[in-house]
Image (spheres, grey):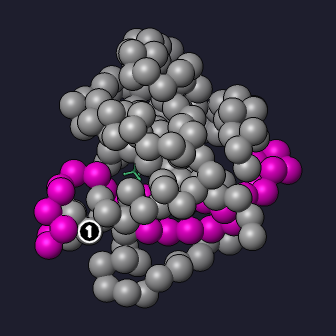
Amino acid sequence: KLPTLAIVGRPNVGKSTLFNRLVGKKLALVDDRPGVTRDRREGDATLLGLEFRVIDTAGYEDEDPETLPGRMRAQTIAAVRESDAALFLIDARAGLTPLDEEIARWLRSETTPVVLAANKAEGRAGESGILEAYGLGLGEPIALSAEHGEGVVDLFEHIRPYV
Ligand code: GDP
Ligand code: MG
C-alpha cells in the first residue's frame, strides 16, 4: 500500500488542478456511496519518481453532519487522519481568508504532518500571499503553481520525508 497525501484547502485554491497534475490520467474514483464520490477523489501520483497515493478533498465549511457540506467536512477530516501527510494549499494571489485561518487552526490540532503550499504563485503576484502564509504557524510555505507546474522540486523535497 502506497503512503498517502491528502490535499486540503478552501474552495478554489487549486486542489483539483494539483491533483490532476500529480495523477495525470490514472485518476480513480474510489467510493460510489451517495455524496462521497463527489467529495473525494483518489489516485496514484508520481512526482519526480516519488510514488504515493493522493486524495483530493472537498469542503471544510459546514459542521452540521446532516448537510452535504457537513458530510464533505467529515470526509476531509477523515482523509487527513488516515493520510501520512496533509498538503495545505492557500491561494497566494488572494491572500489569507478566515476559512484559511480556520483550516490552519484545525490542522495544527491534528497529528498528521502538514506541508504548506501557496499556490497560484507564478510570476510575482503571489509574493504578499506567501509572506502572509508564514503567519499560519505551519512552517515555511512552498511557492507553487499547479497550473504552470512551478515549485515541483520544492514540493518534492517537502513531501518526500512523509511518503
Ligand atoms: P479547488 O476548488 O481547490 O479544487 O480549485 P481548482 O483546482 O478547481 O482551481 C480553481 C481555479 O484556480 C481554476 O480556475 C484553476 O484554473 C485556477 N488555478 C489552479 N491552479 C492555479 C495556478 O497555479 N495559478 C493560477 N493562476 N490559477 C490556478
Ligand atoms: Mg476541487
Which residue position holds label 1? Answer: 71
Q: In this view, does 156 lie above or below 63?
A: above
**At which x and y percent is residue 148?**
60, 38
Range drawn in magenta: 40-67
Residue type of the residue flagged with mark 1: Arg
Q: Is residue 46 left or right of residue 108?
A: right
Q: Quadrant of residue 57?
A: bottom left
Q: Residues within 10 Å of mark 1 (few under 14, many from 20)?
A: many
**Helix, strand or loop status at disc 1:** helix
From the viewer's side, name the closer residue of 32 and 77. Answer: 77
Q: In this view, does 99 lie above or below 19?
A: above
Q: In this view, does 39 lie to the left or right of 86?
A: left
Residue 124 is covered by the magenta coloring: no
User: Considering the image in quadrants, where does the N terminus appear?
Assistant: bottom right
**At which x and y percent is residue 110?**
44, 43
Residue 61 is covered by the magenta coloring: yes
Q: Is residue 20 above or below residue 160?
A: below
Question: Residue sitting at 31 percent across and 63 percent down?
Answer: 74
Question: Residue sitting at 85 percent across and 50 percent down?
Answer: 49
Q: In which quarter of the image is residue 45?
A: bottom right
